[in-house]
Amino acid sequence: MERHPHMRVTDPVIASLVEREEARQFYTAKLIPSENYASTAVLEASATVLTNKYSEGYARKRYYEGQQFIDAIEELAIDRAKALFGADHANVQPYSGSPANLAAYTALIAKKSDNQRILGMGLPHGGHLTHGWKVSVTSRFFSAEQYAVDEQTHLIDFDDVRAKALAFRPAVIVCGASAYPRIIDFARFAEIAAEVGARLVADMAHIAGLVAGGAHPSPVPYADVVTSTSHKTLRGPRGGLILCKAEHARAVDRAVFPGLQGGPHNHTVAALAVALQEADTDDFKRYAHALVANAKAMAEQLLSQGVRLVSGGTDNHLILFDAASLGATGKEAAVAMDKAGLEANANSIPFDPRGPFDPSGVRIGSPALTARGLGPADMVQIANWIVAAVRAREDDTALAGICADVREMMTAYPPPGFEKPWPDPALLDTDRALLDT
Ligand SMILES: *Cc1c(COP(=O)(O)O)cnc(C)c1O
């Protein structure tokens, strides 16, 4: 059967590009730790006529008629989020992780207050743009200060967090990270927040699936507000959600709508409900623990090859390696890996001697490969390919050889969300220029 039969007729150019992207996702080893494979059920929910419906407001308090089914879907998503994470309240409407963070700050910082200050983790130390980094609006709408990791251990420097909190007196402290390979001590953050009279926002965008599966401590007991994406380790649709203590429920809901957003993306809310049910299973618990074991196996193998890892290893789904230990820059390493079918991203490392556009590090992780069913022995093989690819970065023949081996391994582990017949690998070898004909 032809894929996307309708789109192929009405818009063959987009259909062809989508098909090539499907082949790319199928045959490459997805090592980007913020990415994953959503299940077929999640994809089905995302591709429904729910996208046609406007439903500004909240269940039973909408501005448009015709909400009987939308209300039921949103309430199910909320109930499932609360049950899965043990939260008092959930808002499932944020369009993604970044707007969820803006909503959290908006909810917790009173409009008329003199204190519009947030303290977050610096981007080069593993924090996210929306934690108050200088190019983000979060440092324009609020005034922001940033804490760091320790230069020796690469662990969050709680002396620095506390000193900055005492000096800066933020209204909100943000914890959570996009590039931090260790367990986050949410209780310690809560203590510091309490000491300085700040609210605590925990952004679990990267680790929500680990938290759901019991492979990382939960921030829910400690944080006033917990924000997350739904598409990273949680394996849901591209979107966001917010959990909070009962006392902040009204403020959070009002911050999301009408504060920052219009109508919720109902197809995404339905897909999130599906993903939350999938995450509330023993299978998912096994997945969460397996992905940590896989990341550790990959880290061990990289270390044994002399690769320098930020913090010396990993406790979660993510590894940052210093490409200089393989004689390359981060970008050179990531480009070579891409040619070898190993998809990653160049990333700053703490105290990086190189600039943000050409950093020293590469960020990799295990969530997507674990979702495909790869195990620790496969991760050792992947680690060996990473080292070989970076070392052979000038040798396109060697890189093509690794790429063929990667494709063979990926074919043995078809990802969730893909149905037979598998994509034609020849689609990947077609010259891009052919797309225009
Ligand atoms: C990915 C991420 C976000 C932003 O999510 P988007 O969906 O890309 O807006 C926010 N915070 C952290 C820690 C993240 O890793």
Image (spheres, rainbow, N blue to C red):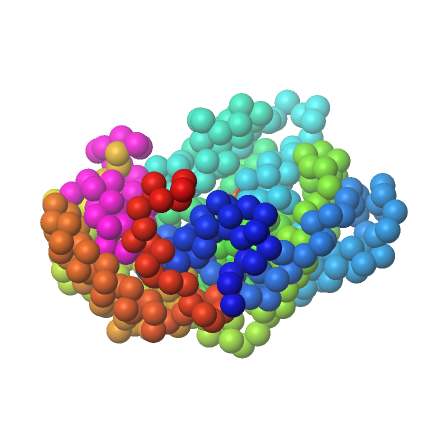
In the rendered image, the residue lying farthest to the bottom is 282
Name the residue located 69 percent from the left edge and 27 percent from the top edge. Answer: 111
- Residue 40, horizontal then vertical, whole percent: 55, 66
Residue drawn at point x = 33 percent, y = 67 percent: 410
Q: Position of residue 172 (x, y in %)?
A: 57, 37
Give 151 or 354, whichever is nearer the viewer.
354
From the top left corner, tell me how far across and down residue 357 is, in percent.
30, 32
Q: Is residue 62 left or right of residue 379?
A: right
Magenta region includes residue 330: yes
Q: Is residue 151 left or right of residue 129?
A: left
Residue 296 in view of the camera: no
324 relative to 293, above or below: above
Query: In the rendered image, which quarter is residue 107 located in?
Result: top right
Q: Position of residue 370 (x, y in %)?
A: 39, 67
| Residue 364 magenta-highlighted | no
- Span highlighted in magenta in the image: 328-357
Please tell me which residue is depicted at 71% across the width and 54% down the height of the picture: 49
Please name the residue shown 38% across and 47% down the image: 179
Name the foreground residue: 106 vs 288.
288
Query: Quadrant location of the C terminus?
Result: top left
205 horizontally vs 386: left or right: right
Q: Nearer the viewer, residue 391 or 359?
A: 391
